[in-house]
Amino acid sequence: MIVTRARLADVDILMERRRELTSWLADRGVDQWSIPLPRSAVAATVGSGQTWIVHSNREPVATLTWLRLDAWTTNPALHNYYRRRGFQHVRTVASRISGACFQRPAQPYLGPLKTDE
């Protein structure tokens, strides 16, 4: 996998990937991300250099925006998944549906660089 900083030219790809993942989650009964994210919000984080794209075999497979993760307050399965992966619960903002925040310290990868391109 390769991680690169997203460019404004990537915004449409990021929006389409989010729509695909929202549909995939909905098919499984999970309402995560069911409220559309405005394109302008995605473009703002990309434009400020805060969004990264993870590529596998030259295909975008994930994005990263800050180091903290958030999940909808109604998604305890995802909360438990994050905890099992070493993330700590920071807080839950009850007034927001996407308000369960988790974090884990970043550590540099020191192993050999390997690409799958």
Image (cartoon, helix red, strand yellow):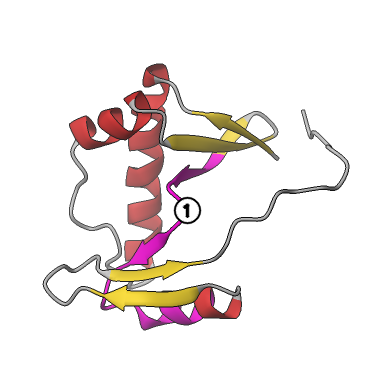
Q: Residue at coordinates 49% horizontally, 76% vertically from top-left?
A: 88
Label 1 Cα neighbours within 10 Å, binned few <14 / some 14-19 / many ≥20? few
Count of picture labels: 1
State the image coordinates of residue 117 (x, y, percent, origin top left). Answer: 77, 28
View extreme (right): residue: 112
Q: Quadrant of the N terminus?
A: top right
In front of the other: 52 or 13:
52
State the image coordinates of residue 58 (x, y, percent, origin top left). Answer: 65, 28
Position above or below: 75 against 68: below
Position above or below: 111 against 41: below
* 101 on left or right of 109: left
State the image coordinates of residue 26 (x, y, percent, origin top left). Answer: 32, 63
Three-letter amino acid code of the residue under disc 1: Leu
* 84 on left or right of 33: right
The kind of secondary structure element at disc 1 is loop
* 19 on left or right of 80: left
The span picked out in magenta is: 61-81
**Residue 41, image quadrant:** top left
View extreme (top): residue: 9
**Residue 56, image quadrant:** top right
* 51 on left or right of 47: right
Magenta segment includes 9: no
Magenta segment includes 66: yes
Q: Residue at coordinates 52% horizontally, 79% vertically from top-left?
A: 83
The residue beneath circle 1 is 67
State the image coordinates of residue 36 (x, y, percent, origin top left). Answer: 19, 48
Q: Residue at coordinates 15% horizontally, 68% vertically from top-left?
A: 96
Q: Residue at coordinates 47% horizontally, 27% vertically from top-left?
A: 6
